[in-house]
Amino acid sequence: MSDPDYPDKYWHFYVELPGQKKGTRQGIRNDLAFAELKREVIDPWKTGRQFTVSGVLVTDKALVSNIRIVQTEHPMTVYTDRYFADLAAAGVFTTADGRLVPFGKGTDFTNELLYATDTVAAPAPSVALLLQLCERLPQAARFLASRREGKQPYKIVDEYDVQDLLHAVIRAYFKYSVDEEPLGKVGGGRSARADLALPDVNTLIEVKFVRGPKDQQRIVEEFAQDLLLYTAWAPLQTFIYMVYNSADLRDPEAVARLQGNGNTELNGKRYRTAIVLA
């Protein structure tokens, strides 16, 4: 596809780099014309030159932890006005960054514009692949738990161990994933962080670790809470609730039934929900 084949408007660009103390630095530009996007981002990225986005200096693309280019039919305000109006009508307070809303409303051109000619192309993102990785994570864990003589085993004793292993496996297939993605506040309540976020496929993953049958009630209660909390993430289209060591639940099938038909609508946001019993 040549440049003239791309729509002139409205282009949105997001870049994230590591900050101090595990924080992040984010640069966001909205409503760019394609010529602006090409001059300010695409050309420098392709040629290895440094560039600046909203005060965030990108000196080396190898340092970038997340990057997205999305094109929408309408300018940002059309989507943000509707988004915040729906939340207000539902009595929901959020500190979510409105500049991120268009990234869940348009067509993603990140791979095509930035990686199409790279020696190693970015893999095609797939929610189905994500679900398969979550389902088969216990097999990977068992392999690492019994290693060669003299090698320390990788033991899973809590949710953090599950998160770290899952993140490592996902990064083998998905170029961009973010652990502990910060979310806004919903309904004036507490703010939250998603265990794993994959903006390429508009998906959040929440990991739960089961220690015994008594965790059944906690798993059910936290599922209901997370369904509401994660509506604050503007790009959300799929929410994966992964329950690790689920065989130790009192009634795993009851937890699986919480998924229903997989369609969820809360606070004016519609998204898919998948419960993975691993």
Image (tube, rainbow, N blue to C red):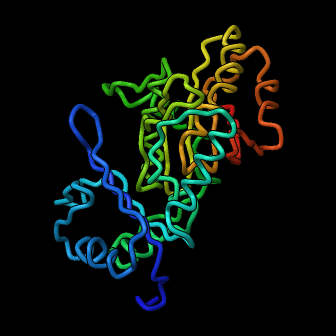
- Residue 161 location (% of width, % of height): 45, 26
- Relative to 112, is 208 above or below? above
What is the quadrant of residue 61 in the picture? Answer: bottom left
Residue, x 31% and y 49% (percent of image)?
A: 26
What is the quadrant of residue 260 in the picture? Answer: top right
Task: Please give left or right for residue 159 compared with residue 153 in the image.
Answer: right
Task: Please give left or right for residue 205 compared with residue 14 in the image.
Answer: right
Q: How many marks?
A: 0
Pick the front one: 204 or 150: 204
Residue, x 64% and y 34% (percent of image)?
A: 241
- Residue 170 location (% of width, % of height): 48, 47
- Residue 140 location (% of width, % of height): 52, 37
Residue, x 55% and y 70% (percent of image)?
A: 74
- Relative to 170, is 126 above or below? below
Residue, x 49% and y 35% (percent of image)?
A: 184
- Residue 226 location (% of width, % of height): 62, 29
- Relative to 227, is 59 above or below? below
Pick the front one: 182 or 127: 182
The quadrant the C terminus occupies is top right
Task: Please give left or right for residue 131 compared with residue 45 in the image.
Answer: right
Which residue sits furthest top? Answer: 214
